Amino acid sequence: MAHNIHFNEQTGKNSFFSVKEKAWHGLGQIVQDYPTSAEAIQYAGLDYDVVKSPLYTKAEGFSIDPNGMVNSGTSIDVPHYYATLRTDNNAVLGVVGRDYEVVQNRDAFSFFDSITGNGDGIMYETAGALGKGERIFITAKLPGYIRVGNDDMIEKYLFLTTSHDGSGSITAAFTPIRIVCANTLNAAMHHKSNTIRIRHTTNVKQRLEEAHRVMGIANTRAVQLEEVFNRWAKVRITDSEVKKLIQAALVPNKEVLKNLAEGNADELSTCFVNICDNAYEYAMSNPTQLQETTKGSLFGAYNAVTGYFQNVRNYRNDEAKLKSLLLGGTAQLRTQAAFNLCMDFEQNGTDNFFMN
């Protein structure tokens, strides 16, 4: 699987760090102890500044030499647009408008610090830069666990990503992950998002400082999810119901949903059938699905869908996987659909999944 981790030619290192275990193709720095935010920035090679630099173009009459360089013509200012530039190596990261405000990597990390008061209890676990450094990401583990049953533990993470190329907002999200199989159990409760997004516009620093108040949802969601998952661990569901739930969660459009509702198996695409079969096989045979909390339970059915996207499905590269799981991609949408279906099954006790 390809990767897009930035390689810094000046330092000879990949811009990525993780605690104790290497990820992302074994690249980057591995550290034994959880670092401070300042240390994490250095380990991940994120200790660079980004500035907005004026853009210029050439007037008519310019020529291009054999090396592709413009060597004549009058420079003309491009009004209201700027290049975002790394100051350590002059790499151009993107083109942005005049209202775009750069958020330095250290300020993104300080956002996490502010949540718990100067980083107390926050454990930075991974961080890195993609491409030329135009996108960075951070994961930090929060204290405590979501406990399902006696010993099924779910760790609580905060995930943050921001870009320096104008392609997207600053995104921070609460992301619970089941330890035994590393499933991302990212689910919004009662139509409320686990995610906040902040635009790169004026006063963004102030908005970052205020954002930690909103991230109080992490504690609220943890309590809510623990209650829900423990209830689901006690709700029994048959194998055939699990298969129907998987199909309904993974359905790509209304036409397929209609065929499922009408029992038109011959009208289903081979691709969709194979995806559902793979997820069902994971549900029935993966060792993590045979635990007390998951075997034959509604919690196990939900984990079948999250586990498929986390541990079975193939992605173009790790960046695509990250986007799919955490940045509003297919995996996040489908696992949210599975969560909603499980909520409905718990409340109504029916497997009429195809009528939504």
Image (tube, rainbow, N blue to C red):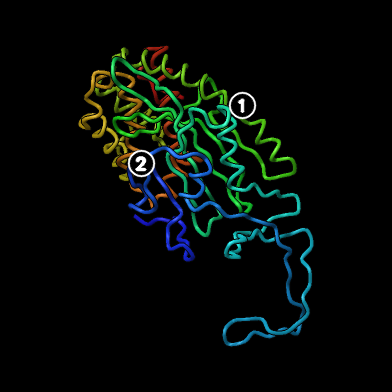
Judging depth in this view, the residue of 331 and 156 nearest the camera is 156
Q: Which residue is mark 1?
A: 214
Residue at image coords 74%, 59%: 81
The kind of residue on which mark 1 rests is Val
Q: Is residue 328 visible?
A: no
Residue 324 located left or right of residue 147: right
Whether residue 142 is situated above or below residue 54 in the rendered picture: above
Judging depth in this view, the residue of 273 and 202 nearest the camera is 202
Whether residue 338 is situated above or below residue 108 in the rendered picture: above
Residue 248: image location, x then y, percent:
38, 30
Residue at image coords 26%, 30%: 283
Residue 245 located left or right of residue 100: left
Residue 196: image location, x then y, percent:
59, 33
Earlier in the chain: of badge 2 and badge 1, it is 2
The kind of residue on which mark 2 rests is Gln
Please, what secondary structure does the residue beneath circle 2 have? loop
Badge number at residue 177: none
Please, what secondary structure does the residue beneath circle 1 have? helix
Q: Which residue is mark 2?
A: 32
Judging depth in this view, the residue of 168 and 126 nearest the camera is 126
CA–CA distance between discs 2 and 1?
31 Å
Q: Disc 2 vs disc 1: which is toward the camera? A: 2
How many C-alpha atoms fall within 10 Å of the one at disc 2: few (<14), some, or many (≥20)?
few
Residue 65 located left or right of residue 141: right
- Which residue lies most toward the bottom here? 66
